[in-house]
Amino acid sequence: MFTVAGQQYTGQELLAKLGALAADKESGVVWHDGYVAALPELAEAGRTVFTSVDAVLLSLGGCLTGRSVYAYAYRAQVDLTARRILAGKPVFENTGRAKAYNKLNWAQQGQGDDAFLQLRNDRSPYDAVRELADNSGAWTLDCATFVQAVQLGAWAAAVGKETFDQSVKRPFNLKDHASTGLTHHKLWFRESQGSEYRLRTPATDRVKAQEPVADVNEQKLLRSAPPGSRVAFVNADPQSAGTDFERENTVKLPDGTYASHPFGILSAAAMKHALALQTVLRYGDEIDVTLKHAAAGKHQSITPDQALSAQTALDRLLAAGDRTALAAWIMEHRTWTENLLYDDLDEYVEDLLYLGEVEIYTITPETTDRK
């Protein structure tokens, strides 16, 4: 929390206030996108109490002075681009859904899981990725392609049209991973819950040996990953295997939260819970089958009257749309499923949800000398 002239604000509330003041031409406040990335630096330094808005602006300006212009521009644009894409409410591109995109700019290559978008030859890469950010409501995106779109959009906005269009190669492709220009500088990964993290780099990519074990843990990786990193959470429940929600790719924002599609902007803990809910709710299908058998008198321990009562309660929860309450009900009746072993969502998350990957791209300021 920040205190300005005795009034408290969250980071986002303070940025919104500064933005509103800047919109008023008579206020004298000039907005700088870099403020988005500089504000967490003030908090980390313990500078959270200010006598006035002017004092905040002076402090933010001090962060930006003499530092890497690209670094602050990129971090700010990661935040702004992620929020802009999410605000447009793109449709979630789940398995089997046809892609929706700007066909004037892009052409689809391949089919099914191998499909990706390739920029048409007469189109500007800068214009195409910024158009996606500005008009995301006309697109379908899954969690992985959302991260790629944020990365490309932030990079483009940070360096400008001329530099971006000259920097990227042709053909220019938008994929769920390894889009044009997005290569990893470092990628920490582990194959299962409880296993050791390994570190993949461009150097290890060139050899066939196993990547070395990295002396890191989940908490350290989450804390040290710079803004813009791809952070992937995984659900080890076999019920999630092969589904759209076996893992959730997110992008880390400057304030330490994580942006994803379709879950939005959440803390790491909340992101795990959101991912867990998707699979826990799938167990409701098993309960539906069990209740249908019981209603027909074909279940050994559930009477038809009990089945009717349970189905009524389940239908009421479905109609209310409270996914957390629905998940709690399913877990309360887990004995009506074959494989759900937990009666508490927190216990489920603790046992099955883990950090699977952290990827730092070569465009991230921490890996580049761009000024």
Image (cartoon, rainbow, N blue to C red):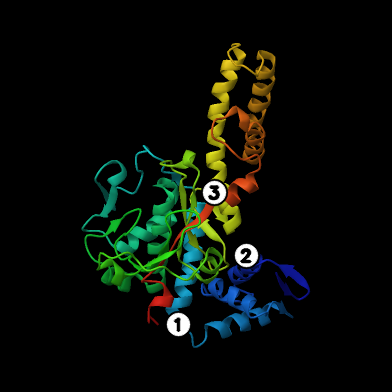
Real-space CA distance between mark 1 and mark 2, rounded to the nearest whole angstrom: 23 Å
For the residue pair 196 and 165, the one nearer the viewer reads as 196
Label 1: element kind: loop
Instruction: Residue type at mark 1: give it.
Output: Ser
Q: Earlier in the sequence, mark 3 or mark 1?
A: 1
Where residue 134 appears, as percent x and y from the top left, is 43, 56
Where residue 309 appears, as percent x and y from the top left, is 69, 20
Q: Is residue 254 above or below residue 240?
A: below
Work out whether residue 28 can be spotted: no
Q: Residues within 10 Å of mark 1 (few under 14, many from 20)?
A: some
Q: Earlier in the sequence, mark 2 or mark 3?
A: 2
Instruction: Residue type at mark 2: give it.
Output: Gln
Q: Residues within 10 Å of mark 2 (few under 14, many from 20)?
A: few
- The residue labelled by disc 3 is 352
Tell me the residue at 60%/20% (across/down). Answer: 291
Q: Give left or right: position of 163 versus 73.
A: left
Give residue 229's quadrant in the image: bottom left
Where residue 349 appears, as percent x and y from the top left, is 59, 49
- The residue labelled by disc 1 is 68
The N terminus, quarter of image: bottom right
Instruction: Residue type at mark 3: give it.
Output: Leu
The disc placed on residue 12 is 2
